[in-house]
Image (cartoon, rainbow, N blue to C red):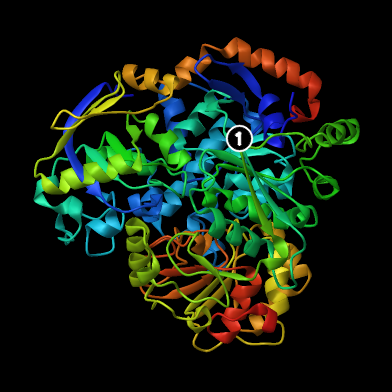
């Protein structure tokens, strides 16, 4: 019998019952909740007279709607200027208070983006099944967990039953061999992978990221990569447990303690794919060939190395793809054949569940240090992923580097990744963004997003256009 | 949940690949704490010429006359015909809520993004996969024929064209069962409450750190 993949092991450990029709009831260990996708689920429970099955599995924090300026943040929820956003955050508070759910509220030091808070607090652990009403829940898979995004009906279902009805996905291995060149970051790796397999390449699969590049990558880098598994179409991304994982988890507030710690670690050390495990699909990339990436279109697969040129639709034979390129060029205001480095940047956003952890902030600060923002860049903001990331960055003096360069230092939240709060692009503006989606209107009506790493975003803020951070 | 058995309805086109959930329902409308009210903002950025905000009177907004779903011939469409990877992006269930309220009960595409696909079934909607060549054929027929409608028979797992041509489609047995009978799956899962408790008892022994309280 063939061995098991990491995904097989995680799945098998959580099957409550296997049904004849191929679906299974899967037990959920951790449920992370935010204000946008939960109100209708709480309401559904209330209408049906149901209570959450296991309150201690739920952790909530508001992130999508929260303002990021110190002024608007000063008076907490009551200070949120947009009344509809305020009601949504108040509704989360009220639901959590009523039911007794642990919530890191708006100005709690531990508040932040759900996918930053989960790993940082130790609420998300190796070997767990984790859900959240947010597609970027794939992030937590970096810990060696099965972590998937769900819709609001499933949020209600998990609250009511502690389970999900699911069908097992297929196994995909994305192996990146070799070593990354200096200046090439985890964000570039995942963008290159999406460029290779496409935004539907992982549909129906759980992706395991393996190979030397991931083995030598930090946990924060792995979180960045797994975060964007969904951008390749996969609900789940994951990395096998190793010493990096265990060192990362150790001592976190919700991590197992005392004798539970030893027991947990022994269990976690089994969380890797057996050497004879069979994957349904294997994709191999050469890590040493990956260059810093910049997206040019309205799908994360529309991405190129920084030295590249915007594609020409005339060269595309597939009519649907050709129409896609033409539409993207028009929306993005770009010319076929234009050099990526000739694209001027109006705003810069460093943040989001993809790239707002301390290593991201350090990488951006290292590029910015001693330089100033280009006058042509209207605004550049750094939005830390949580109150604790902010605190750490300030303790290291990183905020001073940004402020001295004319770059704003904000309060934690999702911010301009999806522009549900006041942080957004104006129509036609180009943004160097460390977020995960470059869809039309994602960062603001008519806004033009280019996905890049924190170092590349920082370099663009200084230069006023995209530059190769390796030559910066 | 509304049951879905058989549907005969006018078809509307969304002729592009990778239609993402931000395009289906832009983020500003996600601030609502209600489950309804999203229909007038489905495809908001394509459908209107101005920028939409929650709480607006949509009836007075300038309509984009070039957006196909605004053409008179497609008014009242209940089946959406589209291209590959429909519904990619976020997990927002507001996307199927908006489409359902717009009037679509069935979406036909060569492929769907996983989370969106799953969310449809929770709302009495059928996301239906047909091969790319068949979808292209249906697009051609749709453009050539005003009033083009299709019949979708979930029980028989067939799409029937006006000329009587039939295309079989696949659907999960459990999802089909729930759709046909309009079943609430929380109620179904709770029938297995004893199994869930039994699993928890086993896990508390195997992995006690997962049950610290």
The quarter of the picture where the N terminus of chain A appears is: top right
Residue at (20% x, 57% y) in the render: B67
The residue at 65%/14% (across/down) is: B197
Residue A49 seen in this snapshot? no
Residue A203 in picture, x, y percent from top left: 51, 42
- Note whether B195 is above or below A309 in the view shown: above
In the displayed structure, B104 sits above or below B136; it is: above
Q: Is residue B9 visible?
A: yes
- Left or right, B91 with respect to A457, comes to left
Tell me the residue that label 1 is attached to: A101
Q: Is residue A99 left or right of residue A288?
A: left
**Which quadrant holds residue B171?**
top left
Chain to which mark 1 belongs: A
**B196 lies above or below A185:** above
Position of residue B148 in the picture relative to residue A35 (left or right): left
Give the quarter of the image for residue B122.
top left
Residue B105 x, y percent position in the rendering: 26, 33
């Amino acid at each position: 019998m063939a061995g098991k993949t990491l995904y097989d092991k995680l799945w098998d450990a959580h099957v409550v019952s296997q049904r004849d029709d191929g679906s299974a009831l899967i037990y959920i260990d951790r449920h992370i909740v935010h204000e946008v996708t939960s109100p209708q689920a709480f309401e559904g429970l209330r209408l049906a007279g149901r209570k959450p099955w296991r309150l201690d599995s739920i952790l909530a924090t508001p992130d999508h709607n929260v303002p990021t300026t110190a002024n608007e943040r000063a008076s907490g929820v009551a200070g949120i200027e947009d009344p509809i956003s305020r009601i949504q955050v108040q509704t989360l508070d009220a639901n959590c208070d009523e039911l007794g759910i642990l919530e890191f509220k708006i100005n709690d030091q531990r508040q932040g983006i759900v996918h930053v808070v989960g790993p940082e607090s130790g609420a998300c652990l190796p070997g767990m099944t984790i859900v959240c009403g947010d597609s970027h829940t794939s992030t937590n898979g970096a810990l060696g967990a099965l972590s998937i995004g769900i819709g609001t009906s499933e949020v209600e279902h998990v609250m009511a039953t502690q389970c999900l009805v699911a069908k097992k996905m297929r196994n995909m291995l994305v192996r990146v061999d070799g070593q990354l060149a200096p200046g090439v970051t985890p964000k570039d790796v995942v963008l290159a992978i999406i460029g290779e397999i496409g935004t539907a390449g992982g549909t129906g699969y759980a992706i395991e990221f393996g190979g030397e590049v991931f083995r030598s990558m930090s946990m924060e880098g792995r979180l960045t990569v797994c975060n964007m598994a969904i951008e390749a179409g996969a609900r789940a991304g994951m990395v096998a447990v190793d010493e990096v994982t265990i060192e990362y988890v150790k001592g976190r507030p919700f991590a197992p303690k005392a004798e539970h710690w030893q027991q947990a670690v022994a269990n976690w050390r089994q969380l890797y794919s057996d050497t004879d495990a069979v994957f349904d699909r294997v994709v191999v990339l050469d890590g040493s060939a990956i260059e810093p990436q910049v997206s040019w279109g309205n799908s994360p697969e529309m991405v190129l190395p920084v030295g590249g040129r915007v594609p020409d639709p005339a060269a595309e034979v597939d009519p649907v793809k050709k129409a896609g390129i033409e539409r993207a060029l028009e929306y993005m205001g770009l010319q076929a054949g234009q050099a990526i480095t000739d694209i001027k940047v109006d705003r810069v956003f460093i943040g989001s569940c993809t790239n707002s952890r301390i290593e991201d902030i350090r990488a951006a600060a290292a590029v910015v240090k001693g330089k100033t923002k280009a006058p042509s860049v209207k605004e550049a903001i750094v939005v830390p992923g949580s109150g604790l990331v902010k605190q750490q960055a300030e303790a290291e003096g990183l905020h001073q580097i940004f402020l001295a360069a004319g770059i704003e230092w904000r309060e934690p939240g999702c911010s301009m990744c999806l522009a549900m709060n006041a942080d957004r692009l104006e129509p036609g503006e180009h943004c160097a963004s460390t977020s995960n989606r470059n869809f039309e209107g994602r960062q603001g009506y008519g806004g033009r997003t280019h996905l890049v790493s924190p170092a590349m975003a920082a370099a663009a803020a200084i230069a006023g256009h995209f530059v190769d951070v390796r030559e910066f | 949940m509304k049951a879905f058995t058989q549907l005969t309805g006018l078809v509307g086109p969304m002729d592009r690949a990778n239609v993402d959930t931000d395009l289906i329902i832009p983020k500003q409308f996600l601030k609502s704490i209600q489950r309804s009210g999203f229909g007038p903002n489905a495809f908001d950025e394509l459908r209107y010429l101005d920028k939409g905000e929650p709480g607006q009177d949509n009836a007075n907004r300038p309509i984009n006359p070039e957006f196909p779903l605004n053409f008179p011939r497609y008014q009242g469409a209940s089946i959406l015909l589209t291209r590959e990877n429909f519904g990619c992006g976020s997990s927002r269930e507001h996307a199927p809520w908006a489409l359902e309220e717009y009037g679509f009960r069935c979406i036909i595409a060569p492929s769907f993004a996983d989370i969106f696909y799953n969310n449809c079934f929770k709302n009495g909607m059928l996301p239906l996969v047909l091969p790319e060549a068949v979808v292209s054929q249906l697009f051609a027929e749709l453009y050539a024929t005003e009033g083009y409608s299709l019949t979708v028979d979930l029980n028989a797992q067939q799409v029937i064209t006006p000329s009587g041509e039939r295309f079989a489609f696949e659907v999960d047995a459990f999802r089909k069962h729930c759709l046909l009978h309009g079943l609430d799956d929380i109620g179904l899962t709770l029938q297995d409450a004893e199994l869930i408790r039994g699993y928890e008892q086993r896990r508390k022994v195997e992995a006690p750190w997962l049950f610290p309280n």
